[in-house]
Amino acid sequence: MSDVRGIVLEKGEDGVSASLQELDRSRLPEGDVQIRVLYSTLNYKDGLVLKGQGGLVRNYPHVPGIDLVGIVEDSKAAGFAKGDRVICTGYRVGEAWWGGYATHASLKSEWLVKAPDGLSDIQAMAIGTAGFTAMQCVLAIEKHGVTPESGEVLVTGAGGGVGSVAVAILGKLGYTVTAGSGRAELADYFTDLGASSMIAREELTELAKRPLQSERFAGAVDTVGGDLLAGVLTAMKYKGVVAACGLAGGPKLPTTVIPFIIRGVTLAGIDSVMAPESERAEVWSRLATDLPLEKLDATTSVVGLEQVMGMADAILGGQVRGRTVVDVNG
């Protein structure tokens, strides 16, 4: 019986193709929790998977979708019962394991958290991996001693999913936030999220031409990497902290050690994929209290499975604003 509907990626001589298919539930991977999926999301990594880029998927056919929220239908795990509302982000679901772009999923219980009270299903996925990562970045900045009184905090790639959520959280916490972006038309959007000012992507990249610039930023959330991150490092204040979580601008970092040994700058790496359970609990707890949900709602759009298949180029090209939630039943 074909009772699962989802996006299936297949690899042929002409590369990777995506199509909506009806599947037998027996084809799902063997997990100890069976979930009726309600919503997923569109992230940068999903774009790579949909296009067959980055070597993220090794085995085809494959169901993508790195995030999901749903209802437990059956569980062999002690911590979860039928009817529980659960969230999955990370652990290479949607890459090495069939993910959330289908009406049903079979997952391992250690990958799941119970959805926090007070968050709707759409809000949980509007947060998703992007919001989870943004909160990790904020926590890293806090734990290295950067407070609202420390000075200006920069968020690069501020128009994307991680960047938008980071701006909203930092703004609510009282930080003076500068939104870094190559999209000047989003200036009002950044102000509505909580940013005090905007700086052009090109201006940040230009900073890398010297090993040190004037001290400006007390903290930074960098979602871009590459030349832009190299520029940001030169303009950090003494004991400034950069939380780095992305590589849309490339994986190379053409910089010097000077910001680190002259100004004591910290470059904190952020990984959301394999974050331990204790960290996940802290992140979701903080998201439930420190993310202004009304601003999250304003940045969120909802699409169906058929629509999301055509959005990979847009998100990889930085043309998707805010968060895109995928209604897998729509």
Image (cartoon, helix red, strand yellow):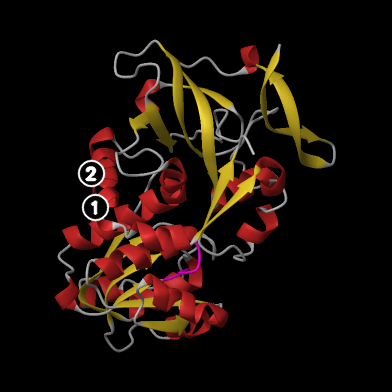
Residue 74, percent from left and from top:
45, 13
Callout 1 amino acid: Thr
Residue that carries the numbered disc 2 in the rendered image: 282
| Residue 319 versus residue 108 in the image, above or below | below
Start and end of the magenta stretch? 156-160
Q: Which of the two discs, 2 and 1, sits closer to the camera?
A: 1
Q: Which residue is drawn at 35% across and 16% down?
A: 81
Q: In this view, does 19 lie above or below 152?
A: above
Q: Residue at x 52, y 25 (%)?
A: 36
Extreme residue toward the bottom, this view: 214
SS type, badge 1: helix
Amino acid type for the residue under numbered disc 2 = Glu
Query: How far across and how far down the image is residue 133, in percent?
Result: 38, 52
Q: Residue furthest right?
A: 13
Q: How far apart are marks 2 and 1 (CA)?
A: 11 Å
Residue 135 image-quadrant placement: bottom left
The residue carrying mark 1 is 289
Of labels 2 and 1, earlier in sequence is: 2
**Is residue 71 inside the magenta stretch?**
no
All told, the count of numbered labels is 2
Q: In which quarter of the image is the C terminus?
A: top right
Q: Is the magenta stretch mostly helix, strand or loop?
A: loop
Q: Which of 23 and 12 is in front in this view?
A: 23
Q: Residue at x 35, y 52 (%)?
A: 270
In this view, 253 is above or below 129: below
Question: Does residue 269 appear in this view?
Answer: no
Q: How crowded is mark 1: few (under 14 residues within 10 Å), some or many (20 or more)?
A: few
Quarter of the view holding residue 278: top left
At 43% from the left and 34% from the top, the residue drawn is: 91
- The vertical placement of 41 against 140, above or below, is above
Residue 186 lies, in percent from the top left, at 52, 77
Q: List x then y, in percent, for residue 169.
A: 31, 63
